[in-house]
Amino acid sequence: MSRFSAAIVRNAVADHLPHALVLLSFVLVGCRNPETLSKGATLHREAQIWQPWVTYLSGEQYSRLHVEIDYVQGCKPRPQTLVELRKFLQENLDKPDGIVIVVDPPITKVTARASHPRLLALRSIDGPPNHSDTDPTAYLHVLFYDSTIFDEEPTTKLQPHVRLIPYPASVYIDKDYWSFVGDKAEEGFLLHEIGHVLGLVHTLDHGDGVHCHDPSCIMYPNIRFSFWKWITFQNPIARRNLCEGCRTDLLRAPQKYGTGKSRWMGPVLMRVEDGYCVASLPGTVMLWFGAPEKFDVQAHRDGVDVHSDLFDIIRHRNGVVTAWTVDPMYWDGKDLPKAVQNAQSDPWSIVRNIASEKEDRIIESALPERL
């Protein structure tokens, strides 16, 4: 969802250097949707169907948070970035049983070269250890990579972003985007994207439905980089915190949205509806007709990973791999056709299309085998 572009603003600093030397101050403009800002606001509204931020902000249903960080060789986040990430999460989330941040072993460049960010995320996420349907642990994933290593390098840098649809729990950080300034901007980009995962900024009270209007806020749509400070060995990035409006939004969210519709099954985010569930991982959506606690996370991951069109759909078509499955035992004597009809009215077009196109096969799969 979120994308970054760069703009340059000229600042005269003749007072600092002889001969009226003109330096540049860079503005790293954040989270502009690749097409339009209004589409970005639409994605935020669609993501409210999930209401995944409630699982992070409230400690009632999920009292722990497991943050998993993957990185490609050469792209490991700075220790200070992880310190600031932990501080940010502890200050803004209600997790009485703690926040765990795990940095996984590096992904080799050979593995990453023939892949794609979402494929890397899909194949590298592990989720909380020993997870089960009763585990009160919410999950968040961050992937650090360098887009220049891919065999098919994009024509533009892959800016830091979050794809709220279909899986709003993965943050993608392309370190090549700000390679000209080193790692100084890393923290600001990461915390900005985490803010989107937490549901910021939906309100129009102090934002545009995507970003905050306060220039001092982390959720403001750009980060100013001072070239003068950079060449004089000072920190060129102005430190920002959440503004009062965004902090208030986070505090009020659990009361506003209640427990929400989302639940965690390890790394899988599941939305529970009337008669069906929608399960997602990066680049994938599974329509599940069965009890939520009976969903087989590993079987879903294994099935997706061997999908014949997985590479083409996610990498080349920038699409979503879809699938469906039914638990026949669950539907013994129950109204599966009604559940399918409910799915055909789901707020997501992805789910509606699966339920409509596969209706006959879904219903037939739950029928007793004919002798």
Image (spheres, rainbow, N blue to C red):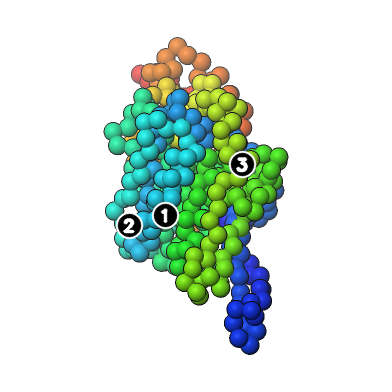
- Say which of 51 and 290 sits in front: 51
| Residue where numbered disc 2 is placed | 107
The residue carrying mark 3 is 244
* Distance from the alpha carbon under mark 1 to that under mark 2: 19 Å
Amino acid at pointer 2: Ile
Q: Quadrant of the C terminus?
A: top left
In terms of image quadrants, where is residue 254?
top right
- Relative to 164, residue 261 above or below: above
- Residue type at mark 3 is Glu
Mark with earlier residue (2, 3)? 2
Disc 2 crowd, CA 10 A, few/some/many (<14, 14-19, 20+): some
Residue 196 percent location from the top left of the image = 55, 45
Q: Residue at x 53, y 62 (%)?
A: 237
Q: Amino acid at mark 1?
A: Thr
How far across and down, in percent of the image, does residue 306 sit? 36, 46
The answer to whether residue 62 is visible is yes
Q: Nearer the viewer, mark 2 or mark 3?
A: 3
N-terminal-most mark, 1 or 3 = 1
Spatial CA span between label 1 and label 3: 23 Å
Please tell me how crowded label 3 is: few (under 14), some (14-19), or many (20+) other residues with Cα within 10 Å: few
Looking at the rendered structure, which numbered label has been put on residue 232?
none
Instruction: Find residue 147 and report its horizontal and vertical position in percent.
Output: 45, 63
* Point 61% across, 70% down: residue: 25
Tag 1 residue: 81
Give the Cα separation between the discs numbered 2 and 3: 39 Å
Identified at 61% across, 64% down, the residue is 27
Element type at mark 2: loop
Q: Does 126 sit left or right of 186 as displayed?
A: left
